[in-house]
Amino acid sequence: MTSPRDASPIASSKPVALVLASESPRRKQLLAQAGIVPDAIAPADIDETIHKNETPRAYVVRLAGEKARAAAERWTGGPALYLAADTTVVCGRRVLHKAEADDEIRGYLKLLSGRRHTVFTGVAVLSPDGKLRTRLSETKIAFVRLTDAEIESYVQCGEGRGKAGGYGIQGRSETFVRHIGGSYSNVVGLPLRETVALLRGGGYPC
């Protein structure tokens, strides 16, 4: 976890520091696109088990809130806004979490091949007064039908490891996309429109 001394100085217009509860380079890059640079990173380590009968929408929003609160418990640098997000992929009734092994990536891609799926991201901003604000973003995606060779090539490139659904749309797998309906940044891992709205609601100047 970094401290304010390790990050860029907080501008006088900022009432508090902005702490990002994620080590994801993709989320940092997306924030930079919106002109937002977190003052610190406080990754949250929480139990990400989905609850019985919990919908994907409720699941990602709950996890985002829990990550924000976990970051607040770790942070010792004074008043802050805590920004957290959680993304998952749903195909049919199956929730596709982060893929860690090649077999898991291979299986996910075979499932997604030629089909539509949905990407959900929950975003949460926790204010210094303890008020939690959340938003949900939903994007529909359709993949072309993938050949076994395309799937194997993607598995071997390693791009899908650690990503929900076993793919990263900002890389090679964008060639798999036949149609996308909704926020592209949501699929990358942080819907910018919802994020900016939440930060503004928390008093952050962006």
Image (cartoon, rainbow, N blue to C red):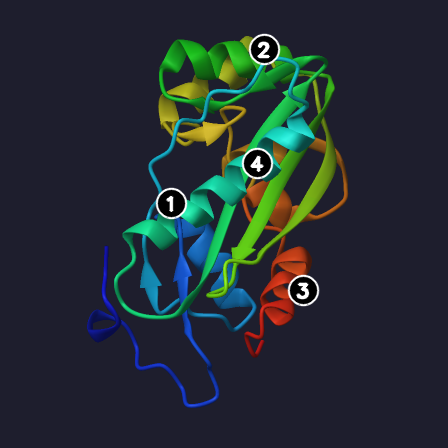
Q: Position of residue 68 (x, y in %)?
A: 45, 49
Name the kind of residue labelled 2 in the image: Lys
User: Mark 1 or mark 2: which is in front?
Assistant: 1
10 left or right, relative to 56? left
Q: CA distance from mark 2 to mark 3?
A: 36 Å
Residue under the point 46% across and 82% down: 14
**Quadrant in which the C terminus is drawn:** bottom right
Quick one: label 2 or label 4, which is nearer the N terminus?
Answer: 4
Q: Which residue is mark 4?
A: 62
95 left or right, relative to 178? left
Q: Which residue is mark 3?
A: 197
As helix, strand or loop, the secondary structure at mark 2 comes to: helix
Q: Which residue is mark 2?
A: 110
Quick one: label 1 or label 2, which is nearer the N terminus?
Answer: 1
Q: Which residue is mark 1?
A: 70
As helix, strand or loop, the secondary structure at mark 1 comes to: helix
User: Mark 3 or mark 4: which is in front?
Assistant: 4
Closest to the observer: 78 or 144? 78
As helix, strand or loop, the secondary structure at mark 4 comes to: helix
